[in-house]
Image (tube, helix red, strand yellow):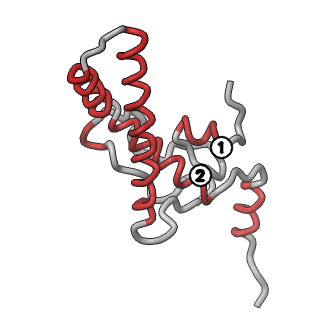
């Protein structure tokens, strides 16, 4: 099992990178076409804003490209070596179909990886919330 507090747990579950209590996405199902790109603005538990600046997730396109290449290579290896299909046109069709089918998963994984590059798990996130709510003397 993935233990709470690891980046891998946050990436694979799509949860908040700071507290890992809540999903970053409005709908946990990546294949709900109407909500595939919709995210919470911030975590309702710890208050972490996911989009640090305007157009923050544009960088996730590069991660998505790398994941797409990885999925495509995996589809080619499985088709060419394990199934034994030697026709390149068939392999090409399998790669394209794989990328189309896994597009929502790749998109969400890339956003999760991107946000986890800049944020880390904070085991004391509840204390930081309490500190923010304390009145300050002026």
N-term mark: 1 or 2: 1
Q: Position of residue 52 (x, y in %)?
A: 51, 67
Q: Count residues near mark 1 (Cα–Cα under 10 Å), then give few for <14, some for 14-19, many for 20+.
A: many
Judging depth in this view, the residue of 7 and 131 nearest the camera is 7
Q: Is residue 126 left or right of residue 89?
A: right
Spot occupied by residue 72 in the image (x, y as percentages of width and height): 37, 32
Task: State if disc 2 and disc 1 touch (CB < 8 Å).
Answer: yes
Q: Which of these two is toward me, 85 or 103? A: 85
Which residue is denoted by mark 1 in the rendering? 7
Residue 121, position as x, y percentages in the image: 70, 50
Q: CA distance from mark 1 to mark 2?
A: 7 Å
**In the image, 32: left or right of 71?**
left
Per the image, the residue denoted by label 2 is 116
- Which residue occupies the extreme bottom position in the image? 138
Q: Residue at x 63, y 55 (%)?
A: 46
Q: Is residue 29 above or below residue 64?
A: above
Label 2 environment density (alpha carbons within 10 Å; few <14, some 14–19, many ≥20):
many
Q: Mark 1 falls on what kind of element?
A: helix
Q: To which quarter of the image does residue 22 belong?
A: top right
Question: Residue 60 — which label?
Answer: none
Residue at 54% from the left image edge and 55% from the top image edge:
115
Looking at the rendered image, the quarter that the N terminus falls into is: top right
* Relative depth, front residue between 26 and 66: 66
Q: Identify whether 37 is placed above or below 85.
A: below
Q: Vertically, is 38 above or below 53?
A: above
Give the position of the C terminus as an image quadrant.
bottom right
Q: Secondary structure at mark 2?
A: helix
Q: How many numbered discs, if any?
A: 2
């Amino acid at each position: 099992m993935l233990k709470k507090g690891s980046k891998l747990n946050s990436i694979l579950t799509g949860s908040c990178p700071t507290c890992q209590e809540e999903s970053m996405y409005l709908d946990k199902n990546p294949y709900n076409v109407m909500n595939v790109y919709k995210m919470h603005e911030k975590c309702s538990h710890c208050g972490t804003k996911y989009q640090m600046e305007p157009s923050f997730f544009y960088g996730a396109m590069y991660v998505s490209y790398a994941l797409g290449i990885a999925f495509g290579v995996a589809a080619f290896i499985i088709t060419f070596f394990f199934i034994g299909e030697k026709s390149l046109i068939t392999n090409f069709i399998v790669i394209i179909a794989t990328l189309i089918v896994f597009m929502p998963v790749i998109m969400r994984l890339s956003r999760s990886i991107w946000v986890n590059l800049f944020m880390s798990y904070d085991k004391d996130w509840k204390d930081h919330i309490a500190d923010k709510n304390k009145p300050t003397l002026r």
